[in-house]
Image: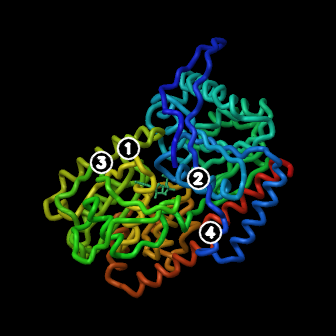
Amino acid sequence: MAYTGTPQPLTVHPQGQSAAPPALPEAHVTGADPLLLAGPVGAARADELDTAFHTVRAALAGRRIIDVNSTMNGGGVAEMLHRLQRYSRGAGLDTRWFTMQGDPAFFALTKQLHHLLHGAVASGSPLNRAGAEHYAAVSEANARALLGVVRPGDVVTLHDPQTAGLVPYLRRAGSKVVWRCHVGTDDPNPYTDRAWAFLRPWLETADAYVFSREQYVPGWLAGRHVAVIRPSIDPLSAKNQPLAPSTAAAVLSRVGLRAPADRDGPAIYRRGDGSVGQVRRNPTSLFSASPPPADAPLIVQVSRWDPLKDMAGVLTSFAEAGGSLNGAHLALVGPDVTGVTDDPEGARVFAECAALWHRLPDRVRTRAHLAWLPMADTEENAVIVNALQCSATVVTQKSLAEGFGLTVSEAMWKGRPVVASAVGGIRDQIEHGVHGILLDDPRDSVSFTAQISSLMGDQCLADELGAGARHRVRDNFLDDRQLLQQISLYQNVAGV
Ligand code: UDP
């Protein structure tokens, strides 16, 4: 993927003052033929998708499909947009993907909305009048930039709370507007109410709304056009393509997360454009006494450095379990926080984990590893995540809240046994004991490590869950299914 438009500090103009707005950064995604999916999903499913694409392309008759979110790197939305755009483009749809610009105050506010929509407490009180005015001003500045490229009739999908303020501008300009929310909680509470009170006035006029779970749809949307579309993964991407064990080992030893071994292959992979890539970059930051031995069991959690992912809780549980985890090593891995522009909490969360790591007793610290993966090349980043997930003895996702949790499907697709919290969309992915292990209470560190330990001591169970997991993802969580739902939404919204 190449980018145009250098992210630049946003200038908010006082009302009434005009200046030519800078163009929003745009991701240029190379198209891929959806029929390529026939390999992993079978010819019948790939044909069904191809036919649906032909139909919608003809019906759209030149109208464009536009996505707007707030980052091109890091996190599940950026991950998904890249691939959905890729196949849509490959099928001949005219697609564009822009990212909003904002200043730290704007992203601090939208991160608060993100936590509140998850039903979680959010520190600070920016949802006051000044916060609302700033949100409105940033939204207006972005809308002005976007209106330079959007045409009447285009179908524009706006993702997450950052983009809600664009809805009225785009509707007035004649676009068809879908607002897609990737976060939510099964149990609405006063925090979610606060978030909806803030967002609702902006969202009222959207043509349709998309959520990842039925339970996330707020009551005030009753009677509106709402679709539930679960996220999915691309089996052909650098993140999920099959990697030989020797290649995965080579990739991990290249980045310092596995000791090198004679049997390692070259650290290479297939890039989206068909060329061969080689992993060259080191983690931007690595807290590790020395790499895990090549034959040590490995527990892996890959997440953004977000308090709701509970990386610190995983590390603490691992430390508390002491020697009971069969000499396993733990790798906590996330993106270089300087590369994720819309997530202001990353540096603080990583610093907390690093401080915990420093305080661990030597015998635990030598087995715990924290890494920031470089984000400069998203495919290189992806293949490192792939190598970690497919080399893991157990993959964990100990989230306190989770919209969907793509990392869970990613690990399941690789046939890995997963121990994950029974929260949000993780419950849609895993049926406990069939496709993985669900932890009823995400804060219960004793059960968490007991489940990991029992999986490590029972290869049959681990294999059974891994096989169940792969089937589950093949049947439900690969991109062809999500693309079909998305096409049907475009048809409804655009009236074609
Ligand atoms: N991810 C990544 N590199 C990292 C950390 C995370 O590519 O260093 C990816 C991860 O593989 C997954 C996405 O970011 O595809 C995270 O999506 P998820 O739905 O799990 O959580 P979100 O970040 O959207 O809350």
Q: Secondary structure at mark 4?
A: helix
Earlier sequence position, callout 4 versus callout 2? 2
- Residue 204 versus residue 318 in the image, above or below: above
Instruction: Please name the residue that numbered disc 4 is placed on.
Output: 36
Q: Is residue 219 visible?
A: no
Viewer-nearest of discs 3 and 2:
2
Task: Kindly report the distance in space between the C-alpha atoms of the residues bearing marks 3 and 1.
Answer: 10 Å
Label 1: few (<14), some (14–19) or many (≥20) C-alpha neighbours in 10 Å: many
Viewer-nearest of discs 2 and 1:
2
Amino acid type of the residue tagged 2 in the rendering: Thr
Earlier sequence position, callout 1 versus callout 4? 4
Label 4: few (<14), some (14–19) or many (≥20) C-alpha neighbours in 10 Å: some
Instruction: Please name the residue that numbered disc 1 is placed on.
Output: 337
**Which numbered marker is on residue 30?**
2
Task: Kindly report the distance in space between the C-alpha atoms of the residues bearing marks 2 and 1.
Answer: 26 Å
- Residue 436 versus residue 357 in the image, above or below: below
Instruction: Please name the residue that numbered disc 3 is placed on.
Output: 284
Q: Is residue 38 visible?
A: yes
Q: Secondary structure at mark 3?
A: loop
Q: Residue furthest front?
A: 275
Viewer-nearest of discs 1 and 4:
4
